[in-house]
Image (cartoon, rainbow, N blue to C red):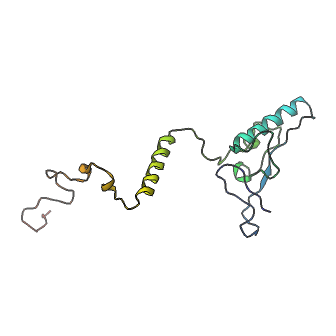
Amino acid sequence: MGQYCCIVNCYNRSHDRQGKRLINGISFHHFPTWKKTQGDLVSEITKRRRMAWVAAARRKTITFDNISKDMLVCSRHFHKGKPAYEMFQCDPDWAPSLHLGPTGVGGNSDRHKRRIQRQQAAVVSPFATPSAATSDDSCCVTPVDTPMADDTPSDSAGEPPVT
């Protein structure tokens, strides 16, 4: 059975669909365990690390207490390609920090709504042209008074101007 990365929008895997091992140089790492019995300091650090990994995964199905053994994080999400030692809290690889997918923060919600509306309109009438979709055709009409970019004044009809 193959291994899959559980980070949102990461599709790295260890085997292809036919079960053949992929030679892509990606390794997979288990979520850290919470070491409750090794003292208060170790317990607190390992608890915070596990919470950081859960937050980095950004999946509703992964919670602090509900992480299966099949949930793995690929090496693409670490600077050095593997997680740092659990006591090195200042190391950037203490928790996954690269290529974590969209953050959900920003102004993309309006943009997403407009895209969904366009897709739904295309499903309703796939043969509609853009000019037929709008009731105001004034944007498609060129004013008569303004010359077009390729219109150049010439002295005689049909001959290009001499430079």
Residue that protrudes farthest toward the front in the picture: 124
Q: Position of residue 94 (x, y in %)?
A: 76, 41
Q: Nearer the viewer, residue 129 or 86?
A: 129
In this picture, is 141 found above or below 41? below
Residue at x-position 10% and y-position 61%: 154
| Quadrant into which the N terminus falls | bottom right
Q: Is residue 58 above or below residue 124?
A: above
Farthest residue, direction top = 40
Quarter-of-image position of residue 66:
top right
Q: How many marks?
A: 0
Q: Residue at x 77, y 61 (%)?
A: 2
Is 49 positioned to the left or the right of 122 in the image?
Answer: right
Which residue is more in the foreground, 156 or 99? 99
Image coordinates for residue 155, horizontal then vertical, percent = 7, 62
For this view, does 16 lie left or right of residue 133? Answer: right
Residue beneath the point at 41% across and 60% down: 126
Q: Residue shown at 75%/61% (left/top)? A: 14
User: Percent from the top left, x then y, of residue 162?
Assistant: 12, 64
- Whether residue 154 sits left or right of residue 95 in the image: it is left
Residue 160: image location, x then y, percent: 13, 66
Query: Left or right: where does residue 156 sit relative to residue 76?
Result: left
128, 147: nearer the viewer: 128
Assign the C terminus to one quadrant of the image: bottom left
Determine the image quadrant of residue 23: bottom right
